[in-house]
Image (cartoon, rainbow, N blue to C red):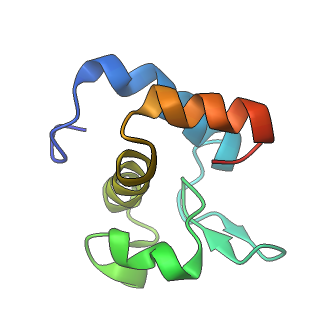
């Protein structure tokens, strides 16, 4: 969060989303959806990781990619969580 400049007020929502997506498992793969990482990025979103696909397996870089996706699409983790709760994905 510090690396990405995200305020600590978003921590709980980011943690909640990560728990739903991967249970916090680094490098997690979902073969059915082809998603990967702690925030389950689609292959087309891997460029959000600092080192693209090479970031998978690195917890910090996987979090950076997930945070970039969430903030880029929803602007706040709280907004992303509301979408996740409504749809079971964000």
Using the image, determine if residue 12 lies above or below residue 15: above
- Identified at 22% across, 26% down, the residue is 7
Question: In the image shown, does 78 or 8 lie closer to the viewer?
Answer: 78
Q: Give the side of residue 68 with respect to residue 23, left or right.
A: left
Residue at image location 53% in from the left, 57% down from the top: 26
Residue reaching furthest right?
32
50 over 10 or under it: above or below: below
Give the quadrant of the N terminus.
Answer: top left
- Give x and y (percent) for residue 16: 58, 29
Camera-side residue of 45 and 82: 82
The picture places residue 48, in percent across and down from the top left corner, at: 35, 69
Location of residue 55 by image quarter: bottom left
Q: Residue 49: which quarter of the image?
A: bottom left
| Residue 33 to residue 84: above or below | below
The percent position of residue 38, horizontal first and vertical second, equals 54, 54
From the viewer's perspective, tell me whether residue 47 is left or right of residue 90.
left
Which residue sits at x=50%, y=31%? 79
Q: How many marks can you see?
A: 0
Left/right placement of residue 58 relative to residue 43 reads left
Tell me what residue is drawn at x 41 percent, y 60 percent. 62
Nearest to the observer: residue 51 or residue 13: 13
- Whole-percent x, y for residue 52 in the image: 35, 80
């Amino acid at each position: 969060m510090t690396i990405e400049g995200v305020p600590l007020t978003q921590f709980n929502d980011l943690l909640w989303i990560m728990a739903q997506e991967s249970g916090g498992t680094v490098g997690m793969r979902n073969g059915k959806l082809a998603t990967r990482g702690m925030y389950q990025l689609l292959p087309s979103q891997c460029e959000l990781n600092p080192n693209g696909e090479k970031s998978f397996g690195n917890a910090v870089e996987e979090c950076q990619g997930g945070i970039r996706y969430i903030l880029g699409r929803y602007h706040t983790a709280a907004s992303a969580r509301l979408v996740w709760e409504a749809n079971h994905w964000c």
